[in-house]
Structure formats: structure tokens, C-alpha cells
Image (tube, rainbow, N blue to C red):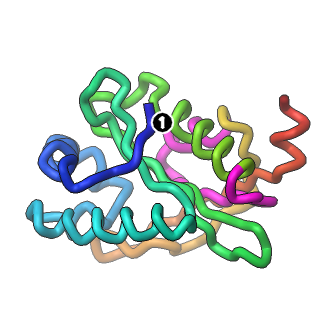
Amino acid sequence: MLRPLGYADIPALYEAIEASRAHLGAWLPWERDIRTQDDLRVFVDRTIRKNADGEGHRGIFEPDGRIAGHASIESANAAQRSAELGYWVRADRAGRGYATEAVRALLEWGFRHLGLHRVTAFADAANAASRRVLEKAGFREEGVVRHRVPQDGGWRDHVMYGLLEDEVRGAK
């Protein structure tokens, strides 16, 4: 279900972002930076490089052959064995459990292949659906990061979540 992103995916990924601008724009300020498929090519270049360098994994999930979203886990600090998790779901595919499945798969991969001790994730304080994804995946709320992301001339607070390798092992 979750696979690496490649250049051939640019048109379909761009279409997924275009179809979801209002939905994504409420939570993710980066979507405004993707105005053309060439803008997306820069992201795909970086994705392929990071995946090849083994710093983490960025991929798309397409449960029925159509892109439903994107998820990533990227090493934040190799010495501390920590990483940060991120994800988004296209508007017409939200609420079907795809993000939760993708997050669980990335966590399994990260703890197993990157040897992680800790994974951190952030969700906009007002994004109840994203917060549920993290909680269903076993994350614990650790606090509010005030004014973390600039957006629409103001600032958005985010809730920080954490998951430790011992908590993952204990859940199995």
C-alpha cells in the first residue's frame, strides 16, 4: 500500500494536491508552494535522494491504484535515534483509515530498519482527524507547541506527539 514516490507519479500526485487544496490548505502551508508540476518535481527530487540516502522513507499510499496521500518518516537526529513523522490524505479519501495504515507501516519500518528510539509527530491543534490518526497509532500527546507554523498572516499551534520504541514493543 505504501511505496516510494517516483517521477512517473508527478501528474497523479499533482492532481491529488489540486483536488484537495481547500482541505490541505487548512492544515499544510506547503501546499501553496506547489503551483505547477515543476514545483512538485523539486519535492520528488528531494524525496528520491532522501530515500536513497537511507535517512528515512517518503512514500505515497494508493490502496486501490489511485494516490490517496503521502507519508514520511525522516531521521531528525541519528545520534539520538529519533525521527519525525508526517502525512496527508487527499480530501475525497479522508476518513477511511488510509493514513493510520500508512503511519503504522512507516513506524514498523522506522523502528526496525532505522533503529529508532523515538518518533515525533505534530498535528495542528484544530485538526481532530490528524490527532486521531496519531493516537490510533499509539502516539502520546506531549504538549502544545505555540505558534509553530505561520499561516494566513497568523500562527498555528500544533500538538506534539511522541512514540518510543519500548511502547511499540510493549504493544506487540
Q: In the image, what residue occupies the spot 52% across and 74% down?
A: 147
- Above or below, comparing residue 113 to residue 99 in the picture: below
The answer to whether residue 122 of the structure is visible from this angle is no
Residue at the front extreme, as displayed: 52
Q: In the image, what residue occupies the spot 81% across and 59% down?
A: 117
Total count of labels: 1
- Above or below, comparing residue 39 to residue 138 in the picture: below
Q: Which residues are magenta?
A: 113-135
The image position of residue 16, as x and y in percent, is 20, 42
**What residue is disc 1 on?**
99
The type of residue carrying mark 1 is Ala
Q: Say left or right for 31 vs 112.
A: left
Q: Nearer the viewer, residue 58 or 25?
A: 58
Image quadrant occupied by the C terminus? top right
Q: In the image, what residue occupies the spot 57% across and 37% down?
A: 133
Asked whether residue 54 is drawn in magenta, I would say: no
Mark 1 residue crowding within 10 angstroms, few (<14) / some (14–19) / many (20+): many
The answer to whether residue 150 of the structure is visible from this angle is yes
